[in-house]
Amino acid sequence: MIRTRFSPSPTGLLHIGNARAALYSALYARLHRGVFVLRIEDTDATRSAEQHVETLQQDLHWLGIAWQEGPGVDGQYGPYWQSQRLSIYTHYYQQLLDKQLVYPCFCTEEELALARKVQLSRGQAPRYPGTCCHLSSEEVGHRQARGLKPTLRFRVPENAVIEFVDLVKGPQRFSSNDIGDFIVRRADGTSPFLFCNAIDDALMRITHVLRGDDHLTNTPRQILILQALNLPLSQYGHLSLITGDDGTPLSKRHGSFSVQDLQRRGFLPQAVINYLARLGHTCEVQQLLNFDELAMHFNLEKLSRSPAHFDHNQIMYWQKISVQLLDKNRFLNWLGEDIKKQIPENMQNVFVSATQPNIAFPHDAAMWSAIFFSDCLKLEELDHEALTWLCDAKEQFFIIAEQALENYGTDFSRILVEMKQALGISGKRLFMPLRIALTGKVHGPELALIAQLLGVKKMQQRLGQALQFIRLLSKP
């Protein structure tokens, strides 16, 4: 059975890079009717926080990503919190000690930093120089008697080659001589990512690991650990990093890209997962898909090896489609209670029809609500384009418009016919000044819907306001 996992460290908000890895892992499990596991890697007690665990789960649920094993969903391979698995790691540490595949290291951070500096000055790749690998048991005991607490380092074999076929990048080959002995237990006795992550993947029978490209160099180290312990290996696939407009890895300097930020800004989960499912992955179907449909079209062979560029226009494309496909009740609920209170109940249907095709976020609807249900517009705040259209229309335009409004009320089709005949104009020259006079905007809902929302009295008021504004501007 296919088993995938997402194993975040609860040290901050869920970033879209990790959200994409979680999504791909869940989609692959769903495609093969397998199991998607959520595991919390909280061994770093100084950085992990319970609130981040709760937020993480909320974010995954918001995205529609469900796990079949993990927090709140018992399974046979738990517990799913690494802080509750310390006895398991101790068991495997002892196996490595018995095999003499690890050794205590008393090097300080200052000593290690100096060694790295010397190696770099010589044009060498920084790696642990093996300072403590040949300490005798007496020397180890003497240092411990002085109160020094060692880390535990894995003894990397010399002149070995570690090879595996990456599910995304293809065949990979690493020399053990470039790796150096690495830490598998911290001085405080806790397990770092390299060790516990590999152990848990093996014990939880994870068959496929999809994770970021930044973990590629961790994989040969984890393979060495698992081979030393005779534990099964997963198949690894390393996803291309997500970059910003400048080609550098996406970070805070490019904007807010946590799932929480996207949710607060009003993005819909369907839009986010449809965008992420295509970010570095080719999906031939260019319509909005639900989770199961996205899983049907997920293919590891269509994952790109090149960095995935975050395209704001693309996520906005899926956002607008998602908004347009909401039914009336979901649309109004998405707007939020504060905006809903501004919309008269008898105007809700017309407001939805008018605004839904023209907005991407709730704050857009708030703007239209203010336009339709406030008493007047601030024409002095018009942008240059709107002001130009209004001034070019001249006084006669608004005099005729007021007359047509008196004759036909909210029947905008007849108003436009009469104005066209009286003024001898059509197209943008006809409807653009009207739109701006009534809403203050160059783009927006259909004029017929605007008329229904404003009503005759308010339209008369705004046409009169526009006429007075034109006259004021024309004064020398």
Image: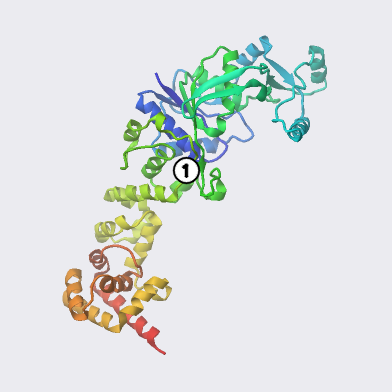
As helix, strand or loop, the secondary structure at mark 1 comes to helix
Residue 57 showing in the rendered view: no
List x then y, in percent, for residue 366.
38, 60
Residue farthest along the top direction in this orientation: 98
Q: Quadrant of residue 348?
A: bottom left
Up-down relation of residue 329 to residue 412 (above or below): above
List x then y, in percent, for residue 338.
39, 57
Up-down relation of residue 293 to residue 467 (above or below): above
Residue farthest along the front direction in this orientation: 123
- Identify the residue under disc 1: 259
> Observer-nearest residue: 277 or 73?
277
Going 38% across and 75% down the picture, which residue do you hit? 387
Side of 19 where 180 appears, left or right: right
Q: Quadrant of the N terminus?
A: top left
Q: Which amino acid, mark 1?
A: Val
Residue 452 showing in the rendered view: yes
Residue farthest along the bottom direction in this orientation: 476
Q: How is the image coloured?
A: rainbow
Q: Quadrant of residue 448?
A: bottom left
Q: Quadrant of residue 437?
A: bottom left
Side of 421 where 229 appears, left or right: right
Label 1: few (<14), some (14–19) or many (≥20) C-alpha neighbours in 10 Å: many
> Observer-nearest residue: 73 or 60?
60
The mark total stands at 1
Going 38% across and 46% down the picture, which residue do you hit? 268
Up-down relation of residue 236 to residue 417 (above or below): above
List x then y, in percent, for residue 220.
58, 23
> Observer-nearest residue: 117 or 363?
117
